Amino acid sequence: MQRLSGKNALITGGNSGIGLATAKLFLEHGARLAITGRDAASLEQARIALGGNVLAVRSDAGKLSDIEQLMKQAEGHFGKLDVLFVNAGIAQAAPFEYVTEDAFDEMVAVNIKGIYFTIQKALPLLSAGASVIVTTSITNQMGSPNFSVYGACKAAQRSLVRSLGLELIARGIRINAISPGPISTPMYGRVGLPNEVEEMVKAEIQGKSPIKRFGEPEEVAKAALFLASDDSSYIVGDEIVVDGGISLL
Ligand SMILES: NC(=O)c1ccc[n+]([C@@H]2O[C@H](COP(=O)([O-])OP(=O)(O)OC[C@H]3O[C@@H](n4cnc5c(N)ncnc54)[C@H](OP(=O)(O)O)[C@@H]3O)[C@@H](O)[C@H]2O)c1
């Protein structure tokens, strides 16, 4: 059964990892789709991999002018949006005393300001009954040494989902979150760790995980599909944890 038949969906950060896996699943379920990313080459690769019939918009989630431009394009293309997956995010690892103002500002710009204004600027396009989904992280409920700014941003996202959940349901718009644990995506290669440290961190996480493996982006995509579809019609301001049990430890 196609669970998003006739729905228009926008996925930020749809050119990689969780966003790309979700884009594939949403298409399989009949959605009309737009994706964003910053990197023009991987955005074009994703557009082609998704079969070409996808609006791919280069847009920096940390820049208000880009967000406004993105929504103009989405409005021109779709008219209305039924699903908004606010998924673009960045993580940079550093011990507390080495976190720079630039790194702090960049993470806050993309992970807090970016998601806030993506939802606000999309609001005029969102249909009654629309579903908004934010990719948070289990770092929003755990202490995360060397990821203090990222964890704080993800906790802020969780708070926003609660507050906006209450504000937007008055218009029939549901907002919920997906909280991934360790998922095999390019993100681990982007946090700024040397290769050998990255491999050590991954092995440590895998050993500690109750399920003894990383999750696949497709496993997160299935939770996104549930929240995007009418199957989750009574779920508001909540968060689905997709982490193999690691946050229970
Ligand atoms: N992987 C995990 O273990 C994990 C765990 C918990 C939460 N998450 C969250 O899951 C989400 C997706 O991450 P992922 O794991 O799929 O990693 P990923 O493969 O690195 O994907 C990140 C996506 O965000 C986009 N992005 C980053 N900064 C952006 C910006 N300023 N403007 C527009 N797009 C931007 C990237 O686009 P470009 O490539 O074009 O920059 C990319 O599409 C993030 O919010 C992340 O925090 C991931």
Image: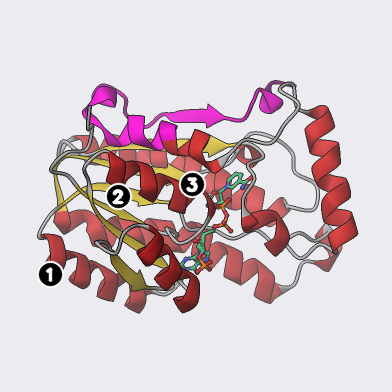
Q: Earlier in the sequence, mark 3 or mark 1?
A: 1
Report whether residue 160 is seen. Answer: no
Q: Secondary structure at mark 1?
A: helix
Q: Secondary structure at mark 3?
A: helix
Q: Nearer the viewer, mark 3 or mark 1?
A: 1
Residue at the spot x=64%, y=56% of the render?
187
What is the distance, in whole Å, between disc 2 and disc 1 at their CAs?
Answer: 16 Å
Looking at the rendered structure, the number of numbered marks drawn on it comes to 3
In the rendered image, residue 242 lying in the magenta stretch gets the answer: yes
**Against 141, is 146 above or below?**
below
Q: Which residue is disc 2 drawn over?
A: 84
Q: Position of residue 64 (x, y in %)?
A: 36, 73
Q: Which residue is mark 1?
A: 76
Q: Is residue 51 magenta?
A: no
Q: Residue at x 59, y 60 (%)?
A: 90
- Circles 2 and 1, Cβ within 8 Å, touching? The answer is no
Q: Who comes first in sequence, dot 2 or dot 1? A: 1
> In the figure, is residue 90 to the left or right of 134?
right
- Tell which of 225 and 64 is nearer to you: 225
Q: Position of residue 10 (x, y in %)?
A: 29, 55
Q: Nearer the viewer, residue 86 or 221?
A: 221
Magenta-colored span: 222-249
Amino acid at circle 2:
Leu
Q: Is residue 193 visible?
A: yes
Q: Amino acid at mark 3?
A: Gln
Q: Which residue is mark 3?
A: 157
Image marks 3 and 2: residues in contact by CB distance under 8 Å:
no
Where, by quadrant of the figure, is residue 56 drawn?
bottom left
Residue 14: image location, x then y, percent: 42, 58
Q: Quadrant of ligand 1?
A: bottom right
- Whichever of callouts 3 and 2 sits on the residue coming sooner in the sequence is 2
Q: Label 1 is placed on what type of residue?
A: Gly
